Each structure stands twice: as structure tokens, then as C-alpha cells.
Amino acid sequence: MTILEADEHYIWHPYTQHKTAAPPIAIARGEGALLWDTDGNQYIDAIASWWVNPFGHSNKFIADAIYKQLTTLEHVLFGGFTHEPAVNVALALKKILPANQQKFFFSDNGSTAVEVAIKVALQSFYNKGEKRPTIVAFENAFHGDTFAAMAASGISFYTQAFEGMFIDVVRIPVPVTGYEQVSYDALKNVLQNQQVAAFIFEPLVQGAAGMVMYEADALDQLMRLCKQNRVLTIADEVMTGFGKTGRNFACDYLGEQPDMMCLSKALTGGTIPMAITTFTQELFDGFYSDDINKALFHGHTFTANPTGCAAAIASIELLLTDEMQRNIERISRRHKQFESEMKAHPKVASTRTLGVIFALDVASSENETYYGNMRTKMYNYFIANGVIMRPVGNIIYILPPYIMTDRQLDAVYQVIRDVLEIV
Ligand SMILES: *Cc1c(COP(=O)(O)O)cnc(C)c1O
């Protein structure tokens, strides 16, 4: 059996309708921003493999750190035990996170990071004997595919089969330009009428919605309203974290600081699945008690896996190098130039960019659905031309690894120009 035959027989892929989907591409190797399939075709990875890989594929510095850790201590249980790599991840994050983030809880992926944050929010009120069962989230949010994370997500085909089985979530409009007041009033209304525990949001950029962007000022106002009502704020930085927005975290653009943050994706440079939920001291103190029932009874078998921790420490070190910071600035600058060109393009309805993230909406008379025809046509064109991008409906976005060269970036911009000629 070939790889593709075996795959077709045995493998169930994510977000895939197997009856109608094209066969997957078997990737054999990666280096920097490039990937090669088993036939030797080359692809530019313009979305950092679902936003996880800022430093390039098969990164030697991270690989060496992983190897060293694997041959020293590959794993140990984290209940009743600890280890230097976990402590060092906490210390490294402490230096770059908003100053109020003091406690670090490890898990395995973005969804579990969100799951932990929501459970902590709900239990922190329970521990005080206060009943607050409701979570507020944005429309078209994406917070993951496990149950509480899915409940907080508002992209319908991810969640429609499970409607009616969720925890209580109220959705408010995103404060994109022109809708700041609508969003603010909606939140105010919910806080007045419901017992809200927490407000969860993707700060400044909603990734899965198609890189929808809104201003820090608007979010600051919503967060202030939450603080006035003793409602906890959860910044889901699973996508935006570690430099994507041009600063280490999207929260670095805010005046307010969130009560909790969710980190994953680029945390380990796209090598080993790991996530961290971070908390204020005050939240931690709400679980600190002589009463065992007030503890957080949540954990995963591979919590704080030392190998993942070693990858995270190496990744944070790489992120903070002058070279990587210059790369982020270079890509941000180039995106801005490309944006001014695309703004004037007759087939482009709108554009936006922040840090290494660039997105445009292709003008369309029809309401393009998430996995609709235009999306498929553009996706196939990009792949046929050796560039991996996954349009969302009529939205094309780029989120390159920071180490992508100017020539590779030029090639990505060019296939976008070209695809606009055929849609
Ligand atoms: C990807 C993503 C998640 C879910 O992460 P997984 O690792 O896929 O479970 C949660 N929140 C945001 C903002 C994301 O982009």
C-alpha cells in the first residue's frame, strides 16, 4: 500500500468530509518555511502549519533542546512531582507576560487551555458560594473543539450538532470599527441581566473567523466593564501569542490586564503539543484552602511533559532574539506595503494587517460560506502553485513563519495577485 492508500483505508482527518474531500498531500520533509511532499514537490508554508510554527520546520535549536531533554528525563507524572523544565517555562513566561499573570497550569492543546480557564472561572465563584453560571463570548469566536471551548465558539458548523448540550454562553458582537458601541451596550445588557462568571475573547484578532481585527481601545472598554462587575476576563492568546501581532502578546497593546490567559500553538515552536493557562495570584488564592473540595480537580496525563517544556524554553529564547524581532518587524512592514497595493485592487473588498498577520476579503456578490466554492477554487490554485494557504470563505490570509525570506514572501504575494485574476 502507498501512503495515500493506507491513509484512505485507515485515517479520519480533522474538519474533513471524506466523501467529497480531495486526497491529502503526503508531506515527507520540512525545512524553514518550506515543505516537500513524497513526490518531491515543494510548498511554501504561508500559514505556519495552522499558526504553530514561527521559527521554521525542523528547527535545529529546538530539536537539540528536545533531544537533550528526551535523553535526560522524557516524562514524569506532575501530580506530587515537579521538574526544572516546568519551573523554567514558568520563569521564562513570567518575564514576558502581563505583570499580573502569576500562576501557570499546564495542559496539552489550545482547547484544554480554554477548558481549564472556563472551569476555573466557574469554580472560583462556586468556591465563594456565589452562583454565576454564564460565560460571555464574541460572535464568530473560535476557542477550540472540546465541549466548553466549543460552547464558547460561535462558528456554527463546528457546533451545530451539539446545540442544546452546552454550558450557558451569551454572545456579543465583535467591536470592529463602527460597532464598538453596539458591542459595549450588548455586554452591559448581559451583565445587568445574567449571572456572568467570565468574558472570553481572542484579543485583537479572531483567527478562525478569518483574521477579523478590532482595536485595543474597544477591548479595554469591555474589560473595564467586566472589572466593574467582578466578571473575570479570559484572553485566549492561543493564536495571537508569541509575536504574531508584532508584540509578544496581543494583550501588550491593552491598558487593562486579563485575569487569565490561554497559550498554546507557537508555545513550543510548533514541535510538541503543549498548552498553558495562566492566572492572577487572586484567582489561585480562591482555590487555596484547608478544604480539599476547593482545589482544582483537573489534570491531564501528560501535564507539563518535560520534553514539551524544553521545546517551550528554546522557543521563547528564539522569540526574544534580536534576529527574530527584526524578522517580525520586516514581515509587518512588508505586509503594510502589500496592503496598500491590495487596497486599490478592484477585486479586493477590504484588507487588514497586524504584525505578521495579513488578510483580505475578495469582493463577491454571493455570500461565500466557510468551505464554499470560492474557497476551494483558491485553495486548489495556491496548492497547484506551491503555496499552502487555507482561505476562509472569500477571505485570504497569510500568517508566515517569522523566518520566511523576502523572496518566499514575494512568491506568496504573487500567487495572491494571480488568484485574484481567476476568481
Ligand atoms: C486553535 C485555537 C484554539 C484551539 O487550539 P487546539 O490546539 O486546536 O485545541 C483555541 N483558541 C484559539 C484562539 C485558537 O486559534
Image (cartoon, rainbow, N blue to C red):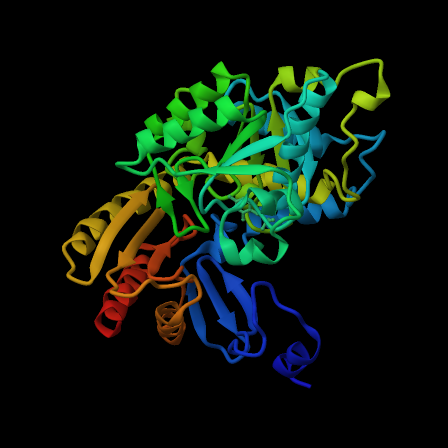
Q: Which quarter of the figure has residue 230?
A: top right
Q: Is residue 269 above or below residue 130?
A: below
Residue at 73% from the left image edge and 40% from the top image edge: 306
Residue at 34% from the left image edge and 59% from the top image edge: 396
Residue 202 visible, this orientation: yes
Q: Nearer the viewer, residue 380 or 143?
A: 143
- Residue 4 in percent (x, y) is at 61, 80
- Residue 269 in percent (x, y) is at 55, 46
Residue at 53% from the left image edge and 41% from the top image edge: 238
Residue at 44% from the left image edge and 72% from the top image edge: 42
Does residue 306 appear to the left or right of 373 in the view shown?
Answer: right
Q: Is residue 227 above or below residue 22?
A: above
Q: Nearer the viewer, residue 252 or 306?
A: 252
Q: Nearer the viewer, residue 1 or 147?
A: 147
Does residue 328 appear to the left or right of 96 in the view shown?
Answer: left
- Residue 138 in percent (x, y) is at 46, 39
